[in-house]
Image (cartoon, rainbow, N blue to C red):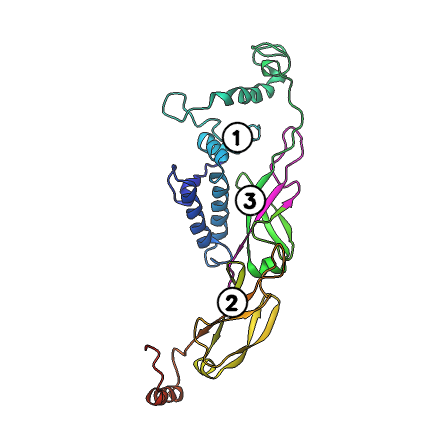
Amino acid sequence: MSYKDYYDILGIKRDASESEIQKAFRKVARKFHPDVNKDDPKAEDRFKEANEAHEVLKDEKKRKLYDQYGSAWKAISEGRQPPPGTERFRNDYGGGGQGVDPNDLSSLFEQFFAGQQAGNPFGGQGNPFGGGGGFGGRPRRGPKRGGDAESVIHLGIQEGYTGGGRELGISTEGQETARVTLKVPAGVRDGQKIRLSGRGSPGAMGGPAGDLFLEVKLVADERFAFEGNDVVTVLKITPPEAVLGTKAEVHTLDGEVQLKVPAGSSTGRKIRLKERGYPQAAGPRSDLYVAIEIVVPSEPNDEERKLYEELAKITTFEPRK
């Protein structure tokens, strides 16, 4: 398994603080999120790598193991033999590398010698240190359930509100091993965790796999954004509609509705639709605010230009006073 430099993936130094890690991850995630970056064919892979790096480096224990053992950190943390081809220790035993915590050595050697029992290099059924089946006299371990794993899934506001099936890849040691359909509950909340049974780390010695917990992160999509608990969407109107008022179709989380835009509406005006926002943990839904944005033609035709010129001559409106 090739070594992945999580620090390089996020573009940070090895002594980066927790806040620097979070800031760098948000920057990379925004750049390579597959719902945003649809032009780069490698965007989804870059996004997955960034998410993988973030999940390790934000956790103090995982980060310490990664810094010490490199690509083998996860196998070490689960008491498994590191995958073939990885370095067992990030230590050259000659003074140049990073030291190994002496407290970890007994469990690592126990794991090593347990696998050698059938052909013990020291002879007999025991080990050179005395005792029976295991290192230091401890018995061999039986089947062990794999550890639970955590990851993050980013959902647009509309996607989180509607819910339903979403296909996603399951990765092991950074490699996609399966694709599953995740059932997203309608109105899932930011920070809520969805459990996928048996999709966590594999068990040891035939034990069952752990579970995978996906933490939901609700993010702005092409139509909706959050302002606090409330939801905001933009309605674009023409200058005549802004001056005279109009009725326009506006998108809400529940579908299209007809909205009355009052005469004299300027860009930035917000029209409130009560309890048409996002479901809350308790109480009614939040509100939806429709933000008015006046747009003008970049290339008016001759007749339009003539009318605008006539309007400019006769208008008494002075917006800069």
Left or right: 209 as drawn, with respect to 58: right
Q: Secondary structure at mark 2?
A: strand
State which mark lies toward you, 2 or 1: 2
State whether residue 290 is above or below residue 104: below
What type is the residue that disc 1 sits on? Answer: Pro
Residue 60 location (% of width, % of height): 48, 35
The mark found on residue 267 in the picture is none
Quadrant in the picture for residue 287: bottom right
Q: Which residue is mark 1?
A: 84
- What percent of the width, then of the height, locates residue 114? 60, 20
Give yes or no for contact between labels 2 and 3 (Cβ–Cβ under 8 Å): no
Q: Which residues are magenta?
A: 195-224
Marks 2 and 3, Cα distance to the nearest angstrom? 29 Å
As measured in the structure, the alpha-carbon distance from the residue carrying label 2 to the one carrying label 1 is: 52 Å
Mark nearest the camera among 1 and 3 is 3
Which of discs 2 and 3 lies nearer the camera? The answer is 2
Task: Name the residue located 67 percent from the left edge and 30 percent from the top edge.
Answer: 206
In the rendered structure, are the residues bearing label 1 and label 3 in contact, judged by CB atoms less than 8 Å apart?
no
Q: Secondary structure at mark 3?
A: strand
On whether residue 208 falls in the magenta region, the answer is yes
Mark number for residue 151?
3
**On the image, numbered disc 2 is attached to which residue?**
233
Q: Mark 2: which amino acid?
A: Thr
Amino acid bearing label 3 = Ser
Question: Residue 97 is drawn in which quadrant?
Answer: top left
Q: Secondary structure at mark 1?
A: loop
Relative side of 51 to 163, left or right: left
Q: Nearer the viewer, residue 4 or 321?
A: 321
Q: CA distance from mark 1 to mark 3?
A: 25 Å
The structure residue drawn at horizontal position 41% and vertical position 78%, both measured from the top left corner, is: 296
